[in-house]
Image (tube, grey):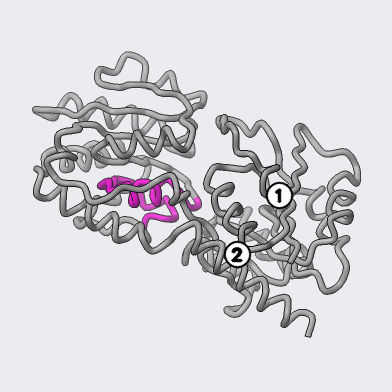
Amino acid sequence: MRVAILATGWAGFNDAACRKLAARGVELLVVTEGDVADTAYENLGIASYARSHVWSGAPADGEITRVLTDFAPDAVLMHSWHFGPYREAIKAVPAGTLRVLWMDNVWRNVPKQWLGRAVAPWWVRSIFDAVMVPSDRTEFFARRLGFAEGEVIRGSLSADTGVFGSGPRTGDEIAGRRRFVAGLRLVHHKGADVLAAAYRTYRATSPDPWDLDVAGLGPMASDFAGIEGVRMLGFQQPAELAELMRTSSCLVLPSRIDPYGVVLHEAAVSGLPIVTTYQVGAAPFFVQDGQNGWTVPSDDAGRLAAAMGRISAAGPERLGAMSDVSRRLGARLTSAGWAQNMHEQLTWRLADLRG
């Protein structure tokens, strides 16, 4: 089987999952934008398991179509239905090619989404045979675009469980670390400014505050300037972030809008309690309120600070119990499991498409 992926960026978790897919005998082509803002992945080594085509700025006219036609895929997975060169390319594939939309957006009831729903019969359903989604929230949006129940491939995202993860952690060890960790792009929709404000409040009101490690790049890095207890680490490669999580006490993700948030899965398999917002799509899957953390309203620094205070005051026994719950929730998805499901789904759907 030959599978082409038209991506809008390539992260460590994409790399890990597709390595597993290639190991199952699938020939891969990865087409992706290089130099994505506020990321700095190194040594992903796509060429070791796939053919690749990396573009920057904007592809030349017909460039993506030629690359895709030369590869002659059995299936094409496309990250975005809006990007013109990818739409042009996927419309050019011959009959009998399975065309799959790989989406993670959630329904937010905004005008742009209502417009997308109105034009979906022509703009989306005329192009794609199926849709891949990571969560029930994204499936709800996909169904509103006209995809039927049987046209949905579920479980489309997984953390790199070969890099992220931890054995059982004791409450004493977690409490002894005394560190929150935040892994995020330092931009508005990720709530970087909310985190900075919340940590200021937490630091001022907690009798024995933990420190905060911030792993990420972006224009809002300056919001953390001068805050006592904050360590700015910049962008961390997957192995570095995985080790940071194994030596931290709790993940904080304050996003205003975050369609999924693979970092929650990374934190869960690392045995971390988690504080996040309702607007993170993966929150229902990896956070059970009161059991392994809390989900708070977005854009509310006060409630975020209060949840951080509850975590640091929880004590070793409860922190150990939270860690156990996180690890059990995180264990439901793996990179290898993603590859197995994807291989099987594409095989079944190709057989149906080709009769």
For residue 264, the mark is none
Which image quarter: residue 204?
Answer: top left
> Is 186 displayed left or right of 114 in the figure?
left
Q: Residue at x 47, y 67 (%)?
A: 136
Q: Residue at x 35, y 57 (%)?
A: 330
Which secondary structure lies at badge 1?
loop
**Kind of residue sitting beneath label 1:** Ala
Image coordinates for residue 151, horizontal then vertical, percent: 63, 75
Q: Is residue 106 above or below residue 273?
A: below
Residue holding disc 2: 132
Image coordinates for residue 352, horizontal then vertical, percent: 72, 82
> Is 287 displayed left or right of 106 in the figure?
left
Earlier-in-chain disc, 1 versus 2: 1
- Residue 45 in view, yes or no: yes
Q: Residue at x 51, y 26 (%)?
A: 218
Image quarter in which the N terminus is found: bottom right
Q: Residue at x 60, y 33 (%)?
A: 43
Asked whether 281 falls inside the magenta stretch, the response is: yes
Image coordinates for residue 174, horizontal then vertical, percent: 19, 40
Which secondary structure lies at badge 2?
strand
Relative to the observer, which residue lies in front, 323 or 165? 165
**Kind of residue sitting beneath label 2:** Met
The residue segment tinted magenta is 259-284
Relative to the observer, which residue lies in front, 293 or 307? 293
Residue holding disc 1: 50
Image coordinates for residue 57, horizontal then vertical, percent: 77, 32
